[in-house]
Image (tube, grey):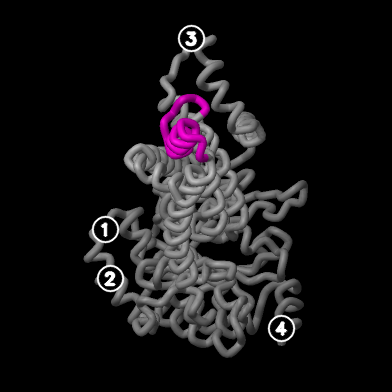
Amino acid sequence: MQSWLTVWSHADHILLGFANTLLLFLLASFLAFVTACCLVYLLEGYQNLPRRGLRALLDLLRMSPFLIYVYLLYYGLPEAGIRFDAWTAGIVALVSYHACYFAEILRAARAMLPQGQAESAQAHGYTPFGMYRRILLPQMILRSGPLFGNQLICCLKDTAFLSIVTVFELTAAANDVQSIYFIPMPAFITAIALYWIVSLGIETCLRLLGRLAKTRGLSYE
Amino acid sequence: MNDNMPVIDVRGLRKSFANVEVLKGIDFQVQRGKTVSVLGSSGSGKSTMLRCINWLEQPDSGSIHITGERIGIRADGKTPMSGRELAHMRARTAMVFQSFNLWPHLTVLENVIEAPVHVQRVARDEAIERARSLLHKVGMSHKIDAYPWTLSGGQKQRVAIARALAMSPEVILFDEPTSALDPELVGEVQSVMRTLAEDGFTMVIVTHEMDFARAISHEVVFIDQGLVVERAEPEKFFTAPDTDRVRQFLGRYR
């Protein structure tokens, strides 16, 4: 019991870490999503050399372990003369890494769209970008709800890796508390509970998306 | 604009898919206010020709002019149009598809105002007002806020027709508009199309419905193996065709 009270006495420290985690997560997932929407637009059309190159790049990033990628950005790039502070490196890593995954989800949804959807948009005089933005992308998003949920939770949990490159967030805060008093269980369980609360929030948002999809006949339930 | 200028003027249209020549030099004109039906057996190239007119398929050679302006190729005669230029040209025509292709994430009303508002930049209120009257015209006023998946095939196609009309196109291209419908739903779509023909819309209809083509058309064009074999007024086409190929074709449908 005493150990829980110790954690409680450091509530402000842990909450500050939690606030940073939330900020990292919201910023990174939003930017990653927007980046992915743009990337998939760039992949529209014939698979010419630049598009193949882009896809190869996305695949490469998806296949590299996130932690190593973060290390590369934070410790590796200074060798090439590019120096990020820990926060910038962390955000850049989260956004670029998860953008690749979001792009893969959207690309699959694009491939599943009936050809007629694009044709009727073209026949009604849409420019390629207008068609993507107004006709294709909304359907791709509505059809991808459950996969987004998965990816957002992964993105949330990947913020924890950033503690290793000295970003102060929830895992780092919990680790501070446990290492001073040697109370790993209460400190880390508190952290897990806070991550869990965010996950519940994510699920609630996606249930709303699912409802939008269902009223439009676009869900697979 | 010159009244004698055809709305659609297709010359020497050729198109191959993987070494199979589907169109072998099609000439095809449609005058303003006319309804032209395009008949032919499956694989004759009639749908491909229609899809070339709004550049959903890119012809290998030949030219297509919509109200006097060439589609797909710039004025220099060889550079392909950009996506934006093509979009601009395509807005002169509208197309009604066999499989409807309504946009499922939008309601019936939103489907109809979507292109006018976002392509033609019509004010939203104005577009809504016009959409309501068009949906009334096709008998879909009661489903204005429904999503497409809740509609029957005939209802979907009537909404698709309203969506096409909302663009105020020079010509509407119908690609087998009733082929995907249950027999009992064909009538409601055909009667809407008949009203449009009476109102003087310019229409090109690719169809397999002989009686309908005969009743609605000013002219019937018969395509066989990628060439226009015969063009005639419907009465002559169906009672006294010039070619054996058409007699044979009609015989199969009787």
Residue under the point 26% across and 58% down: B122
Residue for badge 1: B122
Residue B151 tag number:
none
Residue A149 located left or right of residue B91: right
For the C terminus of chain A, the quadrant is: bottom right
The three-letter code of the residue at mark 4 reads Tyr
Query: Distance between the Cα atoms at labels 3 and 4?
Result: 77 Å
Residue for badge 4: B253
Per the image, label 1 sits on a secondary structure element best described as loop
Per the image, label 2 sits on a secondary structure element best described as helix
Instruction: Please state the chain letter of the residue tagged with numbered disc 4 in the rendered image.
Output: B
Residue under the point 51% across and 48% down: A189
Instruction: Please state the chain letter of the residue tagged with numbered disc 1 in the rendered image.
Output: B
Q: Nearer the viewer, residue B165 or B26?
A: B165
Residue A150 placed where, x, y %? 56, 52
Instruction: Please state the chain letter of the residue tagged with numbered disc 2 in the rendered image.
Output: B
